[in-house]
Amino acid sequence: MRKLIIATTNKGKFREMSKALEELPLQIIPLPSHIYVEEGEESYWENAARKAMKAVEMFGEIALADDSGLEVLSLGGFPGSRSKRIGQTDEERINTILRMLEGKGWEEREAIFRCVIAIATPDGRLERAEGIVRGYIAYEPKGEGGFGYDPIFFLPEKGKTMAELDVEEKNAISHRGKALKEAKKILQRLCNECK
Ligand code: ITT
């Protein structure tokens, strides 16, 4: 069976990705060793593509990577592709956002999670999939599931934060879940082509 390298160092992302792609005729494996890829100020797509291509170059297998982030509308899309860099830990990053929105009502707390996935192959193909989910920044963190900003990402239609959902519930509605649905079709096609 061909291998698919999930090029992420984030355990939360790996859990969601391997769950969503488990039915594919591909052996899903985490990064065999650390890859160093500088994430610049560029777009999500450039960052995702750089990570996936680096993994192909190092390990010679199909690789999938994602770059994702939180965008608060009243903050002009901040932190966006800088989502990882606004604190050292998830807790610090959450507190940065909560501080910036202190005293603001729900109408100024509207936000989007965005996920852009890149799939790179050893024969030089590069494919793209993406997804978004809309929600609001909660007034305080809630829930133990998920990772990153999930405890403050409130979903009005569920009446819950993203961190109150399990992996399958999150994948069913999340930015990454939507991108993974597209990615699954692309990978299925790549598998059929190489038979
Ligand atoms: P890799 O680059 O190794 O995949 P990373 O954690 O560095 O892992 P990003 O550069 O895409 O990934 O980080 C974006 C930031 O947004 C980071 O702080 C994540 O915790 C957060 N984030 C991404 N997806 C998220 C999700 O589904 N729920 C909550 N926070 C998320």
Image (spheres, rainbow, N blue to C red):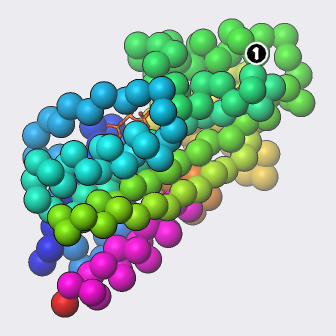
Task: Tell me what residue is drawn at x 19 percent, y 90 percent.
Answer: 195
Q: At which x and y percent is residue 157?
A: 78, 52
**For residue 186: magenta?**
yes
The answer to whether 135 is drawn above or below residue 63 in the figure is: above
Q: How crowded is mark 1: few (under 14 residues within 10 Å), some or many (20 or more)?
A: some
Q: Which amino acid does label 1 sit on?
A: Leu
- Quadrant where the image shows the N terminus: bottom left
The dominant secondary structure in magenta is: helix
Task: Tell me what residue is drawn at x 28 percent, y 88 percent.
Answer: 192
Between 8 and 155, the residue placed more toward the observer is 8
The answer to whether 130 is drawn above or below residue 143 in the figure is: below
Q: At which x and y percent is residue 175?
A: 58, 52
**What's drawn in magenta, residue-wise?**
177-194
On the image, numbered disc 1 is attached to which residue? Answer: 101
**For residue 99: magenta?**
no
Q: At which x and y percent is residue 129?
A: 49, 61
Which quadrant of the frame does ligand 1 lie within? top left
Residue 47: image quadrant is top left
48 lies left or right of 33: right
Between 124 and 95, the residue placed more toward the observer is 124
Q: At which x and y percent is residue 130?
A: 54, 57
Residue 141: image quadrant is top right
The answer to whether 166 is drawn above or below residue 147 in the figure is: below
* Residue 154 shows up from this direction: no
The answer to whether 195 is drawn above or below residue 4 in the figure is: below
